[in-house]
């Protein structure tokens, strides 16, 4: 997706400064991990010649040194990461819209993730970061990266094994819909049930076949299933125009989106393949296309308000 963002001189100066810090972090990480590797090799070599105790002492000391080096540089890496997000990504946001702000340490709470009912499985492990907030005309919105997982356990001859599975790795977008909904309406991918199978037993809110909303839009029905405990309201929300816009929005994504309408908010889940807004450690900051992917996502999220025409207020809040 093309963007109009140009790195201004002030941000260029920050990137040059951060590049020096990045190189130091990168070389120190290599030094620390290298020491650990040398320590492990020393133990094995010494043991093979019958000097296990000497190997443990010498190799152990080298390993401890490597761990100390990594622990010290971890603090600098956290500062580097935070400054990149605040100063570089923050500048990109202001270029897209002066009203946009980022809080790297905040996100969509697990309570709100569950409340959105975008996914029926309760997370067993949850992480969120990079909360971005804004307002376009009348519509307030915010979005953040989320990684929610559930676990399964299997019994093997070697004991119990735990396996982690993604519920969502991507972005949750929340927009003001300017209407207090009486019911709950959820739009999920057509193949959603098959992907989670038996885990529907852990539903936050149980929707069955009786809650399926039949809509007269064949193209929309190919991609989505709509559930609601208020059929009339669901049809009132999902106008032909909105269904068409949701379809267009979905076509711009590599994976099928999920949506829900609860209280006065619209929630959208976007599955994504990578973690965005992160500074590189082992690659230079001084390449021209450094921010291309991040800016593509930021612009896309910002444009949702226009894509779904959320500023056209056909309702007033009760």
Image (spheres, helix red, strand yellow):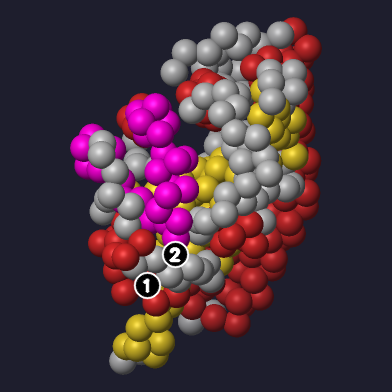
Q: Relative to 2, is 114 above or below?
A: below
- Disc 2 packing (10 Å; few <14; some 14–19; many ≥20): many
Q: Write the residue at 29% across / 65% down.
A: 209
Type of secondary structure dominating the magenta stretch? helix
Front residue of 126/81: it is: 126
**Residue on which disc 2 sits:** 120
Q: Is residue 278 magenta?
A: no
Q: Earlier in the sequence, mark 1 or mark 2?
A: 2
Instruction: Using the image, tell me which numbered label, if any, was put on residue 175.
Output: none
Task: For residue 281, say whether it is visible.
Answer: no
**Pick the front one: 174 or 69:** 174
Q: Position of residue 198 (x, y in %)?
A: 31, 74
For the record, the magenta segment spans 218-246
The residue where tag 1 is placed is: 199
Secondary element at tag 2: loop
Residue found 42% across the figure and 49% down from its top: 232
Marks 1 and 2, how far apart in space? 8 Å
Across and down, in percent, residue 172 comes to: 55, 45
Quarter of the view holding residue 278: top right
Image-quadrant location for residue 81:
top right
- Residues at discs 1 and 2 in contact (Cβ within 8 Å): yes
The front one of 165 and 189 is 189
Instruction: Check the image and report above or below for 146 versus 304.
Output: below
Q: Alpha-carbon neighbours of circle 1 within 10 Å: few (<14), some, or many (≥20)?
A: some
Instruction: Classify 36 as above or below 291.
Output: below
Q: Quadrant of the C terminus?
A: top right
């Amino acid at each position: 997706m093309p963007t109009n963002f140009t790195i201004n001189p002030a941000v260029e100066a920050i990137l040059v400064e951060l590049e020096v810090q990045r190189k130091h972090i990168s070389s120190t990480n290599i030094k620390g991990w290298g020491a650990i590797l040398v320590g492990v090799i020393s133990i094995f070599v010494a043991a093979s010649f019958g000097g296990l105790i000497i190997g443990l002492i010498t190799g152990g000391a080298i390993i401890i040194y490597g761990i100390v080096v990594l622990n010290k540089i971890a603090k600098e890496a956290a500062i580097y990461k935070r400054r990149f997000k605040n100063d570089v990504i923050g500048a990109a946001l202001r270029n897209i819209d002066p009203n946009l702000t980022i809080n790297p340490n905040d996100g969509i709470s697990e309570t709100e993730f569950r409340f959105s009912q975008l996914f029926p499985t309760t997370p067993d492990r949850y992480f969120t970061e990079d909360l971005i907030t804004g307002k376009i005309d009348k519509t307030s919105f915010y979005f953040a990266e989320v990684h929610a997982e559930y676990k399964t356990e299997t019994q093997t001859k070697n004991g119990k094994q735990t396996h982690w599975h993604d519920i969502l790795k991507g972005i949750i977008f929340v927009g003001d819909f300017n209407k207090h909904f009486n019911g709950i309406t959820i739009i999920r991918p057509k193949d959603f049930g098959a992907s989670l199978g038996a885990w529907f037993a852990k539903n936050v809110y149980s929707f069955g076949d009786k809650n399926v909303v039949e809509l007269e839009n064949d193209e929309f029905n190919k991609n989505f299933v709509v559930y609601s405990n208020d059929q009339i309201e669901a049809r009132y929300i999902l106008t032909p125009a909105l269904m068409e816009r949701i379809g267009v929005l979905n076509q711009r994504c590599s994976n099928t989106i999920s949506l829900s309408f609860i209280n006065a908010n619209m929630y959208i889940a976007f599955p994504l393949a990578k973690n965005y807004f992160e500074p590189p450690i082992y690659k230079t900051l001084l390449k021209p296309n450094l921010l291309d992917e991040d800016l593509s996502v930021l612009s896309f999220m910002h444009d949702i308000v226009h894509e779904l025409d959320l500023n056209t207020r056909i309702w007033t809040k009760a």
